[in-house]
Amino acid sequence: MTKTLTQSQLLDAAQLLRDGKLVAFPTETVYGLGADATNDLAVAAIFEAKNRPSFNPLIVHLPDVAAAEAFVTFTDEARTLADAFWPGPMSLVLPLRGDAGLSDLVTAGLNTVAIRVPAHPLAQALLREVGLPIAAPSANPSGKISPTTAAHVLDGLSGRIAAVVDGGQCGVGLESSIFGGDPITLLRPGGISREAAEGALGRALAQGGGLAKPNAPGQLASHYAPDAGIRLNVEAKQDVAHLGFGTGTADLNLSPTGNLTEAAANLFSMLRKMDALTQAAGADHFTVAPIPQHGLGLAINDRLTRAAAPR
């Protein structure tokens, strides 16, 4: 049975992780499913609980840059981004140190690993208490909608994991942006906009992703998917449930004022609700209004495109 732990029970959560158990915990982006990244059996349990493809690498969470330096080698540009955006919703894919000691399952056999320093106070407290690198993909069945509350975690993983730490609603609501390579490229849009990263680096960024064999998490063509199908860029409500953005008639609205930050925070929760509305109506799909392709809109459209992809 999966326990729900409170902030006052972080010591219990840390001990479960040290014991090789799976513990979901809040970050500013989404809830992560944590395991000791040096423990092969614990990491394997992540893949089993999520039914996640073993070629899909994981992000390792650490409390600060100093802790990260024990596992990866920073390029100059990576350090620039780390200085600008950590702690925060950004992951960096960096060369793995030979003596890192991480499970090969974390890196999917690659010579790089994705590292993140989350800003959420509960995530920070847990990472400092446990004293281990924690591998933590989103705490949901693989390919399904990411969780932004403890209840979402339990909806998908109850009985498959030891515990979830309830930290309320996640503030950002989209997974971290992932940057990697030398020179740096954008591997997955997320909570840090491309424009912000370009401002820190002082140059334009290329974007990769959508790979058959990912070199960073979140690059599978079909991902974040509800059970119902999705039609994107539909201007107005028609004969099925409609998820709006800005003005106009809709069953639910990501942001009536057209605020991309609000839309990002609402995205996964509203995809779940739209899925329920669609199933209740006996329909096979719902529609989504166009989202501007700038700022956090880039990440929102990335998630929607993957959610709507053929499965």
Image: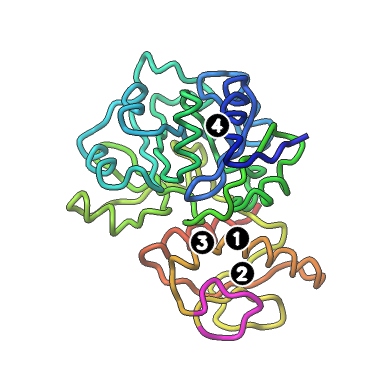
Q: Nearer the viewer, mark 2 or mark 3?
A: 3
Quadrant for the N terminus, please. top right
Mark pair 2, 4: CA separation = 29 Å
Look at the image and give the residue range highlighted in magenta. Answer: 247-256
Q: List x then y, in percent, for residue 54.
A: 59, 30
* Type of amino acid under label 2: Arg
Q: Is residue 69 magenta?
A: no
Tell me which numbered mark, 3 or 4, is placed earlier along the sequence.
4
* Type of amino acid under label 4: Phe
Q: Nearer the viewer, mark 3 or mark 4?
A: 3
Judging by the rendered image, the residue that carries numbered circle 4 is 55
**How many tags in the picture?**
4
Tell me which numbered mark, 2 or 1, is placed earlier along the sequence.
2
Judging by the rendered image, the residue that carries numbered circle 2 is 231
Within 10 angstroms of label 3, few (less than 14), some, or many (20 or more) residues? Answer: many
Query: Who is closer to the viewer here, 165 or 301?
Result: 165
Looking at the image, the residue that sits furthest to the left is 202
Determine the secondary structure under disc 4. loop
